[in-house]
């Protein structure tokens, strides 16, 4: 077999492994991608919540987006500021995070398990989306 065929499977396995590990960089074709940096936060070890923060950008222009972050199937959410920055204190648990902005595709992460004493920092890139009317 050619090595190129194995690279796709290898990349997928690395993304799945790194989702549980320390750094995630998974790309969704034509939808954008996210990078997740996970760092120890000993000052936040005594609470049952963690800080989830990051920046959201347009994939093509790299301009910041005042996009929305929600946790799937919950009432948890926040809006990024005009610089694309968001920060939200979230209870420990396992979540799929959804990033969305009008005119851009919506990106949903794989399940991420939030743990005590850890900081989660996203860099999110949403691809622009063109919507056509059926009338034209």
Image: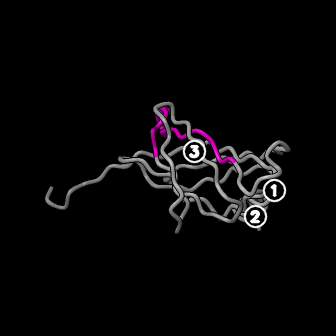
Q: Secondary structure at mark 3?
A: strand
Based on the picture, tell me whether residue 120 belongs to the magenta stretch. no
Image point (46%, 55%), residue name = 106
Q: Secondary structure at mark 1?
A: loop
The quarter of the rendered structure image containing the N terminus is bottom right
Residue 92 at x, y = what percent? 71, 60
- Residue 13 marker: 2
The quarter of the rendered structure image containing the C terminus is bottom left
Q: Quadrant of residue 116?
A: bottom right
Judge whether residue 4 can be spotted in this image: no
Residue 23 at x, y = what percent? 76, 49
Of labels 3 and 2, earlier in sequence is 2
- Labels 1 and 2 touching (C-beta < 8 A): no
- Residue 21 marker: 1
Residue sitting nearer the eye, 32 or 65: 65
Q: CA distance from mark 3 to mark 2?
A: 21 Å
- In the figure, is residue 122 to the left or right of 104? right
Residue sitting nearer the eye, 122 or 40: 40
Range covered by the magenta-colored residues: 51-67
Residue 29 at x, y = what percent? 54, 55
- In the figure, is residue 13 to the left or right of 67? right
Judge whether residue 107 can be spotted in this image: yes
Colour scheme employed for the rendering of this structure: one colour
- Residue 124 marker: 3
Of labels 1 and 2, earlier in sequence is 2
Disc 1: CA contacts within 10 A as few (<14), some (14-19) or many (>=20): few
State the residue lying farthest toward the left: 135
């Amino acid at each position: 077999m050619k090595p190129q065929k194995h690279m796709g499977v290898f990349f997928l396995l690395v993304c799945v492994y790194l989702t549980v590990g320390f750094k995630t960089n998974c790309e969704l074709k034509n939808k954008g991608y996210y990078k997740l940096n996970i760092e120890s936060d000993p000052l936040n070890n005594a609470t049952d919540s963690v800080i989830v923060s990051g920046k959201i950008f347009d994939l093509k222009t790299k301009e910041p987006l005042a996009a929305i972050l929600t946790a799937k199937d919950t009432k948890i959410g926040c809006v990024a500021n005009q610089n694309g920055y968001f920060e939200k204190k979230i209870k420990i648990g396992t979540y799929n995070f959804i990033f969305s902005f009008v005119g851009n595709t919506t990106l949903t992460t794989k399940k991420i398990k939030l743990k005590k004493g850890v900081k989660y920092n996203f860099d999110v890139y949403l691809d622009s989306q063109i919507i056509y009317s059926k009338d034209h």
